[in-house]
Every structure is written in C-alpha cells, then in structure tokens.
Image (cartoon, rainbow, N blue to C red):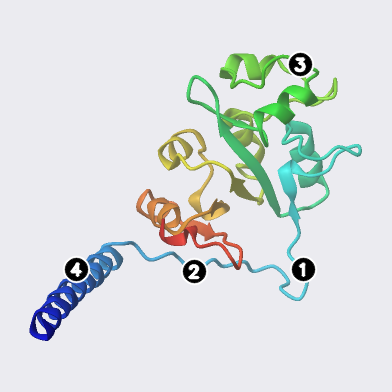
Amino acid sequence: MKIFVIKKMKHSLLIALGLLVVFIAYWSIYYVITPMPADFEYDDNLSEPILIAHAGGEIEGHIYTNSVEAVIQSISNQYKFIELDLRKTADNHIVALHDWKRFHKFSGYEGKSERLELSQCKQRVLFDKFHPATAEDINKLFIGSGCFLVTDKIRDYDLLNSEIQISKDSMLVECFSYHSYLRALKKGIKYPMLCLSGSDFRMFF
C-alpha cells in the first residue's frame, strides 16, 4: 500500500512539474514575440501635475458628454491630455460616448438603451446643444492641436487604427487586462496603458 501511494504521489508530481514546464515555456515564448512598449516622452514642465480632461472635459456643468464642444473647450483651456470614451456603433464605427444608457438620457430619448448606427448618433443632440464626437470629428479636432488623445472603453484595436487617423505618438490607449495590453501592442498601438486596481487579477485572463 505504501509503495502504491508513493508511486502515485511521484506520478502526480511529475505531471505537475510537466505542466509547470509547459506553462513557463508558453509564457517565455509569448513574451519573446511580444513587442516592447515605447517610452512615453512628454517635454512639458513635469513639475506641474498632468491634468486630463475626462470624457472631453466638463462643459457648462455637464460631465461625460464626450462632445465636440467639450473637446473644443478643453483645447481652448489648454488641456494637453483629453480622454474620450470610445464605443462601437451598431454598424461598426467609432463614436465617443460613455455608455448607451447615458447617451440616450443626455439626448432626451426614453426608449430602450440600444446601440445605434453612426447616422443615428449624428442626429442626436446632447442637452439640446452638444454634439457627439465621431471618428471624423476626433481626427479634425486632434490633428495639429498638439493634444494627446487618451482613449477609454474601446478594445477593437483594428477599428481604432482604421478610423482614428491621429499620430500614434499622440494617442494613449487604456487597457484593462494584460492580454488586452499585449494585443494593443501587437496591433501597433505605441502607448497602451495597463489600468488595474490593486485587487484586480484579470491581468492574466
């Protein structure tokens, strides 16, 4: 009986060691073939705090508008970093909005919080005066502005590369898992930002 138990333990140990070797080999290869992120360089006065205009920036007491007017105001107020929440429309285009429920509420719509097509988004007016920023708007606003676009929400990096035409040097992309971070690098995102809380274990999933 003791001999059987010992042999069984050795067998289990060999299996565990084998799995560990496979795991280490997999991650070693994965890291070797993964592009390294570029060092982000920002030459402004680093003694000053870096301020980020969230969701385009506050405008007339409203936050989370992600609107054209909010971005224009933030640029006018000399913000160098402007964050936008980017979502996919029903017809696979980019529009800036935090979430569909909030978008519908801001535009006075009381129906279902469903995804819209790009043409439908363009017809909406937020708080009766502001306009959602499309990819075309984002390109016009940021190219030549000297500002950095900080993206949130979007994980479709092929679509991001296709529709957002600003320089990769001027775009910082938030990623919320380690795999997403590596995928962004492989898709040519120059400055992905891995964003995890202290208790967040999703970085390996």
Element assignment for label 1: loop
Element assignment for label 2: loop
Question: Mark on residue 22?
Answer: 4
Q: CA distance from mark 3 to mark 4?
A: 53 Å
Instruction: Check disc 3 and report the residue beneath it.
Output: 109
- Residue at 51% of width from left, 26% of height from top? 93
- Check disc 4 and give the amino acid type: Val
- Check disc 1 and give the amino acid type: Pro
Instruction: Check disc 2 and report the residue beneath it.
Output: 39
The x, y position of residue 193, in whole percent, is: 54, 59
Q: Nearer the viewer, mark 1 or mark 3?
A: 3
Determine whether label 2 and label 1 are within 8 Å by CB: no
Q: Residues within 10 Å of mark 3 (few under 14, many from 20)?
A: few
The x, y position of residue 25, in whole percent, is: 21, 70
- Compared to residue 140, the image places residue 146 above or below, namely below
Query: Which image quadrant: the C terminus?
Result: bottom left
Q: CA distance from mark 1 to mark 3?
A: 38 Å
Residue 125 in the figure: left or right of residue 116: right
- Residue at 72% of width from left, 14% of height from top? 111
